[in-house]
């Protein structure tokens, strides 16, 4: 999606409605700074308020994502393109999140191990060793939880039996056996347990690209 084009379109439609950035922001319960970011192409409206924005501007979601008023002749074509663009952008974002997961995981292990190593090397009382060791436990746990949340929501897991791709529950991620990003879970479609690998694309095997 062309954020610059979308931003100019939002500004144009806002002016046609004789609304200031502050007035539009008030209608949507956001800041005028957020509206300014949309109109300058620095960010997109959050999906939770996108329909409210379209209603306020008197446009369709397809118009908004296209950055122009879409004619009926091109409506389906534009809608398909916008959908494909959204899918591609999600895949890119998921890849970045999964890369971040590795960083968080490595840092969490480091935060956990460094205090333990220091405590074992320093000549201090036993209670002090315990305190220093515990200093690494809490941030490490927070980091591990964050990494697991990323693994749950970024991308999909592919069933080893039927090939179905889905986002598992937090409970399934937490309690499943795993080797790296491959987890032994029950598929919600075929109800079979299998080793399921992490994939970024939602398209399943056999589907047209």
Image (cartoon, rainbow, N blue to C red):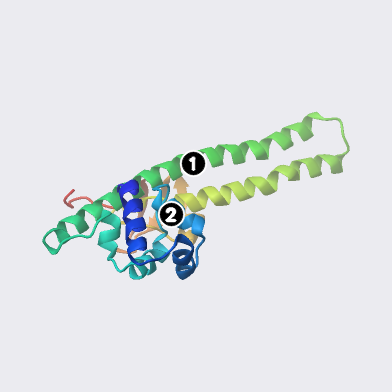
Instruction: Tell me if mark 2 has few (under 14), some (14-19) or many (20+) residues whose alpha carbon lies within 10 angstroms of its own.
Output: some
Quadrant of the rendered image containing residue 132: top right
Residue at 49 percent of width and 61 percent of height: 171
Residue shown at 34% from the left, 48% from the top: 3
> Left or right of 136: which side holds 187?
left
Which residue position is annotated with label 1? 100
- Residue 175 visible here: no
Q: Let me know if residue 21 appears in the view.
A: yes
Which residue is outermost to the left?
Answer: 73
Disc 1 is placed on an element classified as: helix
User: In this figure, which residue is indicated by the disc labeled 2?
Assistant: 153
Q: Residue at 43% of width from left, 45% of height from top? A: 181
- Which residue is more in the foreground, 137 or 38? 38
* 198 sits left or right of 33 in the view: left
Q: What SS does tag 2 mark?
A: helix
Q: Residue at x 23, y 60 (%)?
A: 69
Pinpoint residue 94: horizontal percent, then vertical percent.
Answer: 39, 47
């Amino acid at each position: 999606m062309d954020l610059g084009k979308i931003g100019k379109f939002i500004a144009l439609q806002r002016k046609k409605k004789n609304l200031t950035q502050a007035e539009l922001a008030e209608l949507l319960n956001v800041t005028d700074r957020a509206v300014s970011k949309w109109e300058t192409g620095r960010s997109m409206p959050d999906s939770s308020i996108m329909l409210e924005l379209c209603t306020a501007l008197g446009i369709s979601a397809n118009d908004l994502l296209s950055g122009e008023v879409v004619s009926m002749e091109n409506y389906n074509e534009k809608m398909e393109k916008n959908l494909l663009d959204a899918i591609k952008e999600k895949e890119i974002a998921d890849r970045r999140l999964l890369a971040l997961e590795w960083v968080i995981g490595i840092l969490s292990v480091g935060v956990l191990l460094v205090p333990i190593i220091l405590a074992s090397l320093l000549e201090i009382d036993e209670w002090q060793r315990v305190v220093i060791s515990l200093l690494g436990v809490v941030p490490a746990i927070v980091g591990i939880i964050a990494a697991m949340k990323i693994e749950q929501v970024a991308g999909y897991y592919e069933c080893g039996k039927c090939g179905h791709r889905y986002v598992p529950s937090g409970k399934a991620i937490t309690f499943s056996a795993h080797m790296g990003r491959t987890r032994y879970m029950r598929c919600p479609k075929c109800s079979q347990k299998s080793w399921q690998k992490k994939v970024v694309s939602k398209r399943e095997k056999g589907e047209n690209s």
